[in-house]
Image (cartoon, rainbow, N blue to C red):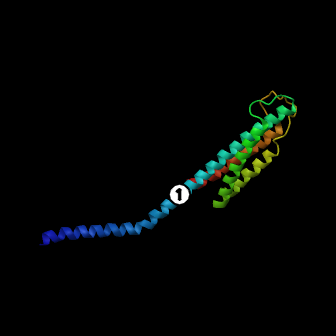
Amino acid sequence: MWQVTIPALVAALAALTGVTLGALLEPFKLRAVRLARIRQDRADRSAKLIETAMNCRARLLSLNIIHRQIAAGMPPSGASEEDRLDAYRNARNDFRKAVALLELSGPDELAAAASSVRKAEDEFRAQRYTLDDDTSIGQDYPPLAVLVKMRELEEAVHEFARAARRYMS
């Protein structure tokens, strides 16, 4: 009789121990999953901000090029000014959504870095109609004022990426 009962008792005790440990560890597992989800959301939102900021940058440069071509009396190459302006507005709308989501979800340092990127994009946007200084329209380089603001935007994006990396690892 004891030969049948002892293995059953050992099995029951092992099962009870496993269930108890599982119940005790469940809050820790849930917390780990929640933190991983938060990190992933931050990573996705940060990537979206970087992607949309660089898209705005490209669209603003495109607008500057076509504006300089029109001012120089040259026929615009590629898409029309209206099409480029629509593409920029769509890109900027996506960018502003990405910034707002980061400001909403935090943390504060990341939200501040996102706001800095937005400010740099606003300053770059103010230069979109800048004409050539003393260079030819045929050259590949935009005016110096546009280049300065473009580089400030790029630097703000790099600073944001450094701040975002601290919250993803």
Measuring from the top left, give residue 39's x and y in whole percent.
Answer: 56, 56
- Please name whichever residue, 56 or 115, is drawn nearer the observer in this view of the structure: 56
Viewer-closest of 63 and 78: 78
Task: Please tell me whether mark 1 sits on a helix, a strand or a loop.
Answer: helix
- Specify few, some or many for label 1: CA neighbours under 10 Å numbering under 14, 14-19, or 20 or more: few
Residue 108 percent coordinates (x, y):
67, 60
Asked whether, in this view, residue 132 is left or right of residue 13, the answer is: right
In the picture shown, does residue 148 fall above or below 40? above
Q: Residue furthest left?
A: 1
The furthest residue to the top:
138
Q: Residue 109, image x and y in percent? A: 67, 58
Residue type beneath disc 1: Arg
In the rendered image, the vertical position of residue 24 relative to residue 107, given as above or below: below
Q: Is residue 10 left or right of residue 34?
A: left
Identify the residue at image location x=81%, y=41%: 128
Picture quarter with the N terminus: bottom left
**Residue 157 spot, x, y in % from top left:** 69, 47
Q: Quadrant of residue 115?
A: bottom right
Q: Which residue is rendered at x = 85% and y = 30% of the image?
A: 135
Q: Residue at x 69, y 42 (%)?
A: 55
Q: Which residue is mark 1?
A: 37
Whether residue 10 is visible here, answered yes or no, is: yes
Q: Residue at x 45, y 65 (%)?
A: 28
Relative height, residue 8 to residue 112 (above, below): below
Q: Is residue 106 visible?
A: no
- Tell me how many marks there are: 1
